[in-house]
Amino acid sequence: MSAMKRSELLPVFTCFYSAISSNFYLFSLSVIFIGLIGSIYHPVGLSMMSFIGGDKLKAFAIHGIAGTLGVALSAGFAGILGYFFGYAFPYLILGIIFTLLFILSYVFKLQIDAADITAYNAKHNEKENRQLEEPVKTNIVKGFLKEFFHLNLVLIFFVEFLNGFVFQGVFSFLPAYVGVELKNYIFFHNQAAAAGGFFVTTALIVGVFFQYNSTKITKNYKSNKAFAFLVLVSGIFLLISGFTHDILLFISVLAFSAFNFSINPISNLMITQNTHEKYRATAYGVFFFAGFGIGSVAAPIGGIIAQKFSLHWIFVMFGIVLLASSLISSVIKEGKYT
């Protein structure tokens, strides 16, 4: 059974156990395990997608859109189910969904881009044959260090940390910021909470659609250049949002969301282009840990800035961070696994 299939089977048991558990501590433990096991999907799933033939960037874009919509809709869907049928019912439905995914993983076969892999193996066949004469352990260590810890990939990881730091920070404080600034804008009358929810949702929807649009950019520009450009432009609009009000604030937030979401599929493609096939799952794991794990420190840092200064300075800081990220991104060269 492959790692991907195991990652789909384990949540089945934890979800069903959460649905039937009557002990609070055991229920909490099972929910924690759902998150831990579910986190396996990103590195393994994206690694598998990197071997699919055809337009990889388009596949990554569709994957990102589906994930964003899933995150956006799941909370409301689970809330409705929990309200009418009890808290355990959403976990029961989630367990059924994971069961169906597990079954479908045997029905649908992965179509690997065999031509790319064959060409790569032929190119490096002589080098690998020479390495067979060396001790196996030495080969593994040297191969990992050489193919994994190279400058391009390290820069991508660092940039992802900066971008993840900004993304999580922005969408942690954006509802409060636009809610206060736009509470009397359009049809809202001193309704900060409603305005914040509406404008942030609108920004997320715009970002989702522009995420797919990124597939057109790389047809005319190399992925590393397009990536650096998108980071730069999103940083500029985020910086503008920290100093504007009313319609200009709304437009700058929409523009930031559009350009920033477009980064996601391109960054996933760059991991594929800069990582040996043996280490792609590991690379995606480090990549998401950098963005979503280490990047989560944005919330407390942003909170300190808002408390000591003002809410709009958070977005000024995040804009500056993105501008710094764009400078680092400009150093990233074209990947060799294209």
Image (cartoon, rainbow, N blue to C red):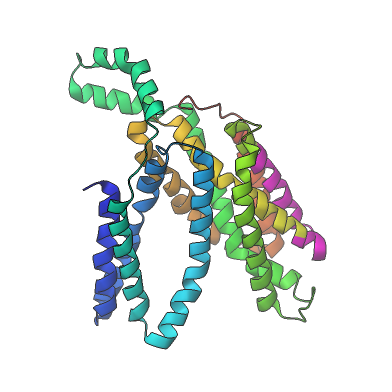
Q: Is residue 233 magenta?
A: yes
Rendered view: 92 above or below 139: below
Between 165 and 74, the one nearer to me in the picture: 74
Q: Residue at x 51, y 69 (%)?
A: 73
Displayed quadrant of residue 125: top left
Q: Position of residue 247 (x, y in %)?
A: 81, 63
Q: Can residue 296 be spotted in the picture?
A: yes
Q: Can residue 161 be spotted in the picture?
A: no
Rendered view: 160 above or below 303: above
Between 284 and 103, the one nearer to me in the picture: 103
Q: Residue at x 68, y 47 (%)?
A: 235
Q: In terms of secondary structure, what is the magenta stretch mainly?
A: helix
The answer to whether residue 23 is left or right of residue 60 is left
The answer to whether residue 224 is left or right of residue 146 is right
Q: Extreme bottom residue here?
A: 84
Rendered view: 226 above or below 179: above
Q: Position of residue 306 (x, y in %)?
A: 64, 64
Q: Extreme front residue here?
A: 107
**Magenta highlight range:** 229-250
Q: Position of residue 95 (x, y in %)?
A: 31, 69
Q: Is residue 325 magenta?
A: no
Q: Residue at x 76, y 79 (%)?
A: 188
Q: Residue at x 55, y 47 (%)?
A: 264
Between 132 and 114, the one nearer to me in the picture: 114
Report how many numbered discs are placed on residues in the image: 0
Q: Position of residue 106 (x, y in %)?
A: 27, 52
